[in-house]
Image (cartoon, rainbow, N blue to C red):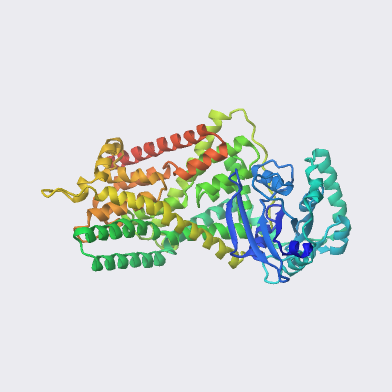
Amino acid sequence: MNQVTQIQQPLRVALVGNPNSGKTALFNALTGSRQRVANYAGVTVERKEGGFTTPGGRRISMLDLPGTYSLRARSPDEAVTRDTILGAQAGERMPDLLVCVLDATNPRLSLRLVLELKRTGRPMLLALNMFDIARHRGIEIDIEGLSAALGLPVVTSVAVRRTGTEALLAKLDALAPPASPAADQASHAWTPPDAAELRALQREADRILAATVRLPRRPDTLTNRLDAVLLHPVAGLLILLAVLFLMFQAVFSWAEPAMDLIEAGFEALGGATDALLPDTGALGLLRSFLHDGLISGVGSVLVFLPQILILFLFILLLEDFGYMARAAFLMDRIMGGAGLHGRAFIPLLSSFACAIPGIMATRVIDSRRDRLATILVAPLMTCSARIPVYTLIIGAFIPNRPVGEGLLGWVGLQGLVMFGLYALGIVSALGMSFVFRRLFWRRTPTEPFMLELPDYKLPRPRNIALGLWQRAVAFLRRAGTIILAMMIVVWFLASVPPAPEDATEPAIDYSLAAMIGRTVEPVFAPIGFNWQISMALIPGMAAREVAVASLGTVYAVADSEEEPTQLGEALSSRWSLATALAFLAWYVFAPQCVATLGVIRRETNSRAWMWVSFGYMIALAYLAAFVTYQGARLLGLG
């Protein structure tokens, strides 16, 4: 009866393996949308956990551990994986079973990790993932011989196929109930292997491979043929630039129909609100709150969701295809000259989506100096929160026309300006990294860059769709919490107190928002910012896109007695081109949002580095806006 009770308890399974072994794809295939994303207790390392039921009725709780090459744990990611396996991670229950995911197309490095895991004494089985690709390439693996040599059950898996996990699920059904805690004493006696032990484990792995795996005599894979072009020192860089340029063009051109649809929806919603509610008395105040505060404020940010999803789409496709690691190799020489490690490229590229996961991704960098340098410059990369700002100003002040004719006819001027802003962020990050290295780490040597290149694989639509869905939900949750809360505050400040009866100016000029804006306006006057912009920068510290929502609310309240206009039209009629360009320059270097500052504090375990990051970025933002505004005025643009 006790055994039956144990079997009915969820089996806690941890997936462990090298980076790029297909571990996360296998996790997605098994758990689907039934997964939670959070952080491990006490650290900012991201964790994914999900549940499912096997065909035999067994309940499984599955944890996707961060990828690792060894249990020596030279980075925070690898330390979390080691501590979770050994039951030493704070707030984590020890897994009942380890499923070690091995890339069947490149088993040598993974097999050494399997032998390391065996030394912990934890119950485990081996899943040979991407087995179909290995077989297609002529790689022959003796499954029974490998299982006997390792003393472990071995199954094959193809995470990207519907039936590719059947063998693994059958093995999970057949497993005995979890052992008692007393059976886990071997794991508590584990000690990290030294260099000699690792070499011995690698020799053992090579011996097992020689006995159980037969490689084709003349491997001529698509990966090798593509790498001959994509890793070329000249052609490869040109292709990388072309991919990035296409991505930024697509952010404008592909998203336009969806943005127009969302914008029309919010306009209809605002019109319906005006038709249902009078503009006087208490109902008039409610009408102002709904139309000017919520619809104009939050709607001015939600309209940019298609552009943000297109950016994420490109990043997810490049990751699934296997191109990200190649881009890191291509950029290694350039980034090394600026004092950044080659591994910093992927965290910096992740920062295009959001600086927070980009900063967290620096955990893959072993050297603390290289991690700190990358953390300090990651917020300079143009995150998705800047897209509403850039798109609003570019759409209002930059003509929507092609750059030229003929071959250049497909290149839009707006997309080219957007690309230039992204490029300026990249150049600024490299420049500041060079400065930081000379200031703080002049005598620290740069470690060599070593990274295993995964095979190219066709992206799986299901994984891409799941990734886009998770990011869309995160953006909408942000809009429904931080942005919504800030818009309520901004609307209140823009509406209270009401204008006096003998007022000769618009009502908003008598509000608390105007008082706050005019108080700080002298500080920002040299860079061309009026009181509305000055006021919007303050709530923009919560999240950069809140500045757009704040402007939307302020100008909606200001126009409430006239025919309401779209925010872009309101700005183009009130701002000079010099002010618009200065606003763009400010947001290239804009200080981080509060959440980013919090992550910097936790990742560096230092308030000093957090304030260094905030201080240098606000100084750069002010300097860039000042030079841009004053220069534009000299050219007659303001």
Residue 637: x and y in percent read 27, 45
Please give left or right for residue 553 compared with residue 17 in the image.
Answer: left
Q: For residue 296, which quarter of the picture?
A: bottom left
Residue depicted at x 77% and y 57%: 178
Q: Nearer the viewer, residue 493 or 307?
A: 493
Please give left or right for residue 628 compared with residue 438 in the image.
Answer: left
Q: Nearer the viewer, residue 332 or 225?
A: 332
Please give left or right for residue 202 compared with residue 164 in the image.
Answer: right
**Quadrant location of the C terminus?**
top left
Residue 148: x and y in percent read 88, 59
Q: Nearer the viewer, residue 591 or 328?
A: 591
Q: Residue lying farthest left? A: 502
Residue depicted at x 72% and y 63%: 130
**Quadrant location of the N terminus?**
bottom right
Residue depicted at x 54% and y 50%: 350
| Residue 13 visible (yes or no) | yes
Q: How many marks?
A: 0
| Residue 348 visible (yes or no) | no
Q: For residue 478, which quarter of the picture?
A: bottom left
Residue 47: x and y in percent read 61, 52
Q: Residue lying farthest front? A: 1
Residue 239: x and y in percent read 56, 55
